[in-house]
Image (tube, rainbow, N blue to C red):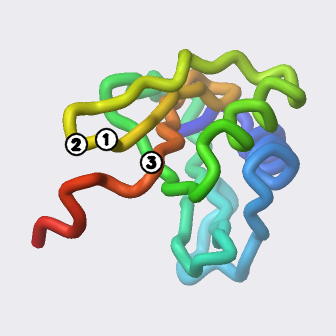
Amino acid sequence: NVKDKDAALKWYEDILGVKQISKMVNGDHLYWLQLPSGAMIHIIENEGAPSAPSHHTAFEVDEIEESHKYFASKGIETTDIQTRNDGQRAFYLNDLDGNRIEICTVSGFGVLV
C-alpha cells in the first residue's frame, strides 16, 4: 500500500527499473508494474493504510555489492550487507511509504520446494 500512487510509480521506475504494464483489473487506485524477469508488482493507493515493515518483497541479484553501491548512489538508505547461515547475503531498504524491500543473493540451500 502507498499514499501516493504516482510518486510511488516514479520511485519504482527510477530506482528499481520496473515498467508500468496494462492493468488486469479496473481501478484508478492502482498500477501494475513488471520486472524484467516477468514478476509483477502492484502499487495500490490507500492513504489510510499503514506500511507493513514486518512484511517485505525480496529481489534476488547476482552482484550484491554492486546493488548496495547502486542504492547508495541514489541516496537510498540501506542496512549493511549481512550473511546468513546458508551463505546467502542480503540487505534491506524502504520505499517512499516505508514498505520494506530485501535485496539478496541466491540461498545456499537452493530451492526448497
Give the number of the mark in front: 2 or 3. 2
Residue 5 in the figure: left or right of residue 51: right
Callout 3 amino acid: Ala
Task: Say whether disc 2 or disc 3 marks the residue closer to the N-terminus.
Answer: 3
Q: Give the number of the mark in front: 3 or 1.
A: 1
Residue occupying the point 37% across, 29% down: 83
Residue at the farthest left position = 113
Q: Residues under labels 3 and 1: Cα distance?
A: 16 Å
Q: In the rendering, at what x and y percent does residue 42 appear?
A: 55, 60
Identify the element where label 1 is drawn.
Answer: loop
Q: Secondary structure at mark 3?
A: strand
83 sits left or right of 91 in the view? left
Task: Give the crowd class for mark 3: few <14, some 14-19, many >=20 residues within 10 Å.
Answer: some
Name the kind of residue labelled 1 in the image: Gly
Q: Quadrant of residue 79?
A: top right
What label does residue 87 carry, if any? 1
From the image, tell me which residue sits under label 2.
86
Q: Earlier in the sequence, mark 3 or mark 1?
A: 3
Q: CA distance from mark 1 to mark 2?
A: 4 Å
Q: Position of residue 72 (x, y in %)?
A: 80, 24
Position of 48 relative to 56 (above/below):
above
Residue 95 is situated, as x and y percent measured from the top left of the image, at 64, 31
Up-down relation of residue 46 to residue 19 (above or below): above
Residue at mark 3: 58
Label 2 – label 3 distance at C-alpha: 17 Å
Q: Which residue appears at 63% of the width and 58% of the height? A: 30
Q: Amino acid at mark 2?
A: Asp
Quarter of the rendering containing residue 110: bottom left
Q: Report if the CB atoms under discs 2 and 3 are less than 8 Å apart.
A: no
Binning the other alpha carbons within 10 Å of mark 2 as few (below 14), some (14 to 19) or many (20 upward) gives few
Q: Quadrant of residue 96?
A: top right
